[in-house]
């Protein structure tokens, strides 16, 4: 019982450091209130000292109060200077405890001083002492409100002896004052205790709220992190890419510092994924991300970051004082690092990547348009400079404008009137005779004039018109082919969209049926890009065309990736060796080797080889030793309108047809 009482008493008079938030709040309150306290104390002590200077001995009336006042001024200055500056928990606690001790010591000193002075004064001077003690103490209690221990100590140390003193020594007036003072002090202590409890509770609830807020913040930070990270590679994701790009753009708009956005696309990833499975595909992506990350980390002094935009596409944001050469350099390092082989279990996969960059302020006036320009540069790289870096340029800008003009005119065009076909013969290298014609599309538009398929086919794909374009062309081609001798075949080009769209081939099959032509005479040419886009769909479509009795050729062979993979897995009839290998056949031994190995491959797989783009007699000469089956090119004939075909075939029949090349 006694122990708990002493314990509670001790608790009442000590400053606890248990709650750092409370200590800090008390300290902050004191920084505002302590200067007031010391000011009141100093001024009123000096006033009493002045009243008694001629009545009491100097040590009591002057020296002692001045000494106390000097301490007060010292503390006054300290608290004034401490105001507003953040301090550590230890420093705050130290000064609260010091204040606690000082409050007790000053109370003892000043109340003893007052009591001693009292005897030297007349009624007025004594009244001053009573007034001084009572009011100063009330002022001090208010100022010490946030430190319960100090406030109670001051009240008890000053007031209790005073009341006892006045009761014992004073007349009726002094006793009445004593009673009054006792009542006021009791009321003040009660107010003080309530206030202190509320203050503590407020700080505690604020602390809980802060903790809660901190926890909520931590949780939302984590959510934000997860929402912005690509789970597979650990790189920042597409959302983050656009967020950062916008933020970077906001900065550079003010600072005029150059900014570039890049897009990287892996070349040959789809075949790896199809052949080795998704687990290997995932590993390749992770490793690609690591390789890109390492290159990007070494771009100092430029600031660069890499993101995974989805699939096998990555994004780059580059900031800093850069030139086009710096970007080309960065692109070269990225393509180089991707060309190193990837381990895929037992085997190695060879891949590459193409990069498109767009620079601000040269291209695009927003993060989004800069990205679109970079994407266009990438598209350009993939079509014309695979495995390389392309910077968006003024020519690209002009192309985009051209393309949108083409797209708009295509949308408004009367397709069945404006589309037509020209035909280029396929020559049997053994007999020199024409075995068929490849139909090549032409578009004659009243506004644009004649537009080549390399321009309008991609435009039709983008505008979602390719299905209609293909059907119009196929109907025309079949109608014209019906008039040819039955031994002459028709090769017809399909776009990736034709064989990847769900109802695409079904409608083509219906057209072939309706034409009444023998499906065996028809050969559909399909490029590798179509396989890469959606292998399963493409496979199904090819199987359906084969089931109809048509033939299927793999066009532009050798320009894509993992070509062998397709040859192996698809029910093909022919392979058309891309004309880029033929162009320097007579001058470049490497091209010779490639063509030779491709024709051998066709022999091994029982496929017919078609050599495209034979332009010169020299090329044909070299071809002689390379075992090709069929050939096509300006040397034999340029693409011709359907009307010229009867005359062409008749002329050929009259001419002496002999084997063009010797068969090994
Ligand atoms: P492709 O299938 O590789 O067609 C062969 C292209 O090479 C044709 O260009 C042809 O005119 C050209 N060519 C033929 N012999 C030679 C030669 O000896 N030297 C050179 N330098 N070129 C030669 P064209 O007609 O401009 O067609 C370009 C591409 O457009 C075609 O490439 C094909 O991919 C596409 N295309 C053409 N017609 C159609 C079509 O009806 N539908 C679809 N989807 N694509 C088509
Ligand atoms: Ca073709
Ligand atoms: Ca071709």
Image (cartoon, grey):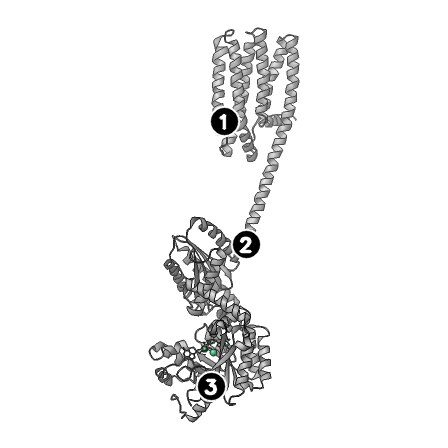
Q: Quadrant of the N terminus?
A: top right
Q: Is residue 41 left or right of residue 332?
A: right
Badge 3 residue CB within 8 Å of ligand 1: no
Give the position of the C terminus as an image quadrant.
Answer: bottom left
Cα distance in 3D space between marks 3 and 2: 65 Å
Residue at the image point whose x is 56% and y is 7% from the top: 119
Measured as percent of width and height from the top left, residue 576 is found at 45, 80
In the rendered image, which quarter is residue 149 located in?
top right
Q: Earlier in the sequence, mark 3 or mark 2?
A: 2
Q: In the image, is 502 to the left or to the right of 561?
A: right
Question: What residue sits right under mark 2 in the picture?
Answer: 226
- The residue lying toward the viewer, choosing from 639 and 86, is 639
Q: Residue at x 48, y 61 (%)?
A: 372
- Per the image, the residue denoted by label 3 is 644
Where disc 1 sits, the SS reads helix
Residue furthest front as drawn = 446
Label located before the other in sequence (2 or 1): 1
Q: Judge the density around disc 2: few (<14), some (14-19), many (≥20) Cα neighbours within 10 Å.
A: some
Label 1: which residue? Answer: 79
In this rendering, does residue 429 appear at all?
yes
Up/down of 125 relative to 364, above or below: above
């Amino acid at each position: 019982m006694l122990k708990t009482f002493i314990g509670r008493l001790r608790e009442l008079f000590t400053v606890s450091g248990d709650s750092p938030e409370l200590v800090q709040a008390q300290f902050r309150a004191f920084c505002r209130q302590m200067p007031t306290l010391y000011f009141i104390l100093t001024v009123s002590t000096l006033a009493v000292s002045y009243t008694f200077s001629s009545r009491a001995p100097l040590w009591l009336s002057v020296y002692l109060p001045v000494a106390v006042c000097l301490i007060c001024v010292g503390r006054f200055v300290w608290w004034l200077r401490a105001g507003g500056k953040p301090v550590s928990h230890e420093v705050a606690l130290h000064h609260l405890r010091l204040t606690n001790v000082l409050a007790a010591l000053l109370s003892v000193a000043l109340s003893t001083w007052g009591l001693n002075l009292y005897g030297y004064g007349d009624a007025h001077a004594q009244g001053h002492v009573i007034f001084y003690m009572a009011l100063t103490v009330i002022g001090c209690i208010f100022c010490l409100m946030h430190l319960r221990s100090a406030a109670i100590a001051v009240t008890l140390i000053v007031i209790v002896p005073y009341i006892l003193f006045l009761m014992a020594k004073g007349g009726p007036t002094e006793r009445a004052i004593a009673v009054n003072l006792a009542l006021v002090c009791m009321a003040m202590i009660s107010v003080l205790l309530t206030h202190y409890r509320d203050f503590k509770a407020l700080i505690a609830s604020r602390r809980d709220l802060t903790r809660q807020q901190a926890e909520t913040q931590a949780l939302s930070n984590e959510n934000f992190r997860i929402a912005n990270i690509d789970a597979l590679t650990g790189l920042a994701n597409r959302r983050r890419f656009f967020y950062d790009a916008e933020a970077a753009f906001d900065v550079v708009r003010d600072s005029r510092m150059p900014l570039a956005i890049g897009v990287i696309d892996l070349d040959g990833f789809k075949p790896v994924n199809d052949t080795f499975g998704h687990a290997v595909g995932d590993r390749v992506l992770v490793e690609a991300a690591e390789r890109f990350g390492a290159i990007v980390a070494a771009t100092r002094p430029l600031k660069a970051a890499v993101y995974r935009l989805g699939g096998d596409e990555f994004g780059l944001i580059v900031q800093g004082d850069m030139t086009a050469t710096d970007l080309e350099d960065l692109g070269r390092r990225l393509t180089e690092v991707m060309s190193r082989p990837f381990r895929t279990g037992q085997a190695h996969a060879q891949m590459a990547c193409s990069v498109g960059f767009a620079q601000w302020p040269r291209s695009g006036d927003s993060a989004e348009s800069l990205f679109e320009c970079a994407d266009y540069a990438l598209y350009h790289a993939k079509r014309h400079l695979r495995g390389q870096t392309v910077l968006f340029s003024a020519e690209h800008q002009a192309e985009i404008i051209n393309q949108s003009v083409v797209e708009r005119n295509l949308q408004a065009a009367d397709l069945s009137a404006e589309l037509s076909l020209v035909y280029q013969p396929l020559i049997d290298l053994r007999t020199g005779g024409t075995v068929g014609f490849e139909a090549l599309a032409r578009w004659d538009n009243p506004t644009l004039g004649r537009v080549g398929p390399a321009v309008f086919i991609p435009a039709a794909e983008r505008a979602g018109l390719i299905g209609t374009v293909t059907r119009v062309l196929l109907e025309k081609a079949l109608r014209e082919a019906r008039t040819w001798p039955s031994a002459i075949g028709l090769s017809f080009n399909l776009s990736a969209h034709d064989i990847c769209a769900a109802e695409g081939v079904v409608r083509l099959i219906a057209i072939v049926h309706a034409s009444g032509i023998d499906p065996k005479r028809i050969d559909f040419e399909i490029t590798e890009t179509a396989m890469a886009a959606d292998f399963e769909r493409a496979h199904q479509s090819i199987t359906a065309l084969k089931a109809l009795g048509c033939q299927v050729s793999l066009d532009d062979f050798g320009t894509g990736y993992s070509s062998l993979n397709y040859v192996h897995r698809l029910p093909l009839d022919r392979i058309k060796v891309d004309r880029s290998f033929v162009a320097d056949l007579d001058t470049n031994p490497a091209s010779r080797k490639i063509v030779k190995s491709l024709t051998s491959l066709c022999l091994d797989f029982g496929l017919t080889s078609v050599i495209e783009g034979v332009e010169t007699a020299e090329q044909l000469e070299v071809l002689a030793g390379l075992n090709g089956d069929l050939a096509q090119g300006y040397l034999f004939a340029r693409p011709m309108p359907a009307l010229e075909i009867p005359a062409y075939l008749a002329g050929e029949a009259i001419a002496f047809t002999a084997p063009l090349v010797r068969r090994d």
